[in-house]
Amino acid sequence: MPSAPPQSVPELQQAVLDGAFGPLPGELTVTSAFWVHHTTRLAGSQVTYRNRYVLLRSGDSFGACSFEAGDVAPDFCADASGHTLDALIRHESAPVRIAALDAYLGRVRPHRDAADAEAVTLPTGAPKARAEARDAAVAGLLDIAPEAKVALIGVVNPLVAAIRERGGVPLPCDFNLRTTHWGDPVTDDMEQVLAEADAVVATGMTLVNGSFDRIVEHCRKQELPLVVYAQSGSAVARAFLGAGVTALSAEPFPFSQFSADTTTLYRYRAARA
């Protein structure tokens, strides 16, 4: 393990390539690659969520990253299996790099074996029940004062509700939504909500669109709590606990929406100084 936590995703990437976290990634091979296009529209909702994932399996670990339409072609998977993680961590595509980093970090330190992880079992059930259980687990990491302004970067409607239920004021920000379920305006200006925020909740997708480093830097400098909820790059985000990230809901593959049976997510909290 490195002597100090990384300060940015590129710094983490280089540390992994140098072997600071365990075996050199050139010694580990990708055995399976997946390209998944997935949509969800829960009963009673007017919103269809559209998600695309690239998934890489290495040993007993799956690395995952969501991406925008067109960022990764389906035929990427045709030649990805058999490559070393080293090659894919250096790939020109950001989603592939994050998925490969996630596979590596999840393999050398699986969430299921992490002593500082709190395992949360999501129950068997229909999509709505499982989504509610997942979002409740994320909301349980929020520790905010009444009237605190909470930047929500990556809007999930139950988290908007959870912030309000805890007395906070949500500041929703998303590149793909214009309003919340209740009609609240959603901005695409991340700097605006960061400037107003007393706390921040961010999706793991920020790892791939280049905004994660900016969010972590801002929260570190302003000493703001930062909760990350991650299917994308859950083990990548974990590397920043105590270095800007104060709490994490990590959901490795298989994700809750891909199964009706029980699955597990892992909650982490940074050690208090």
Image (cartoon, rainbow, N blue to C red):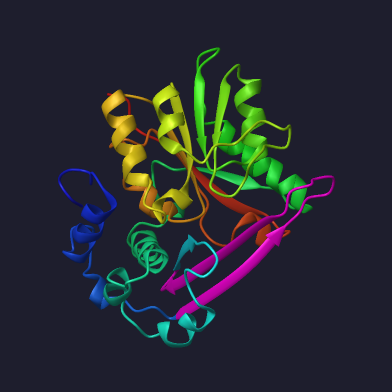
**Residue 271 placement (x, y as % from top left):** 33, 30
Q: In which quadrant of the rendered image does the C terminus lie? A: top left
Please state if 180 lies on the left or on the right of 141 as rendered: right
Nearer to us in this view, 141 or 80? 80
Q: Is residue 63 above or below residue 206?
A: below
* Most common secondary structure along the magenta stretch: strand
**Residue 105 placement (x, y as % from top left):** 34, 59
Image quarter of residue 4: top left
Decide whether residue 98 is among the magenta residues.
no
Query: Does the rendering let one see residue 241?
Result: no
For the magenta stretch, what is the residue range? 32-60
Decide whether residue 56 is among the magenta residues.
yes
Q: Residue furthest right?
A: 44
At a point 20% along the width and 60% down the height, the residue shown is 14
**Residue 266 placement (x, y as % from top left):** 50, 46
At a point 36% along the width and 52% down the height, the residue shown is 210
Q: Is residue 206 above or below residue 159?
A: below
Q: Is residue 76 above or below residue 13?
A: below
At a point 42% along the width and 87% down the height, the residue shown is 79
Query: Does the rendering let one see residue 7?
Result: yes
Nearer to us in this view, 207 or 253? 207
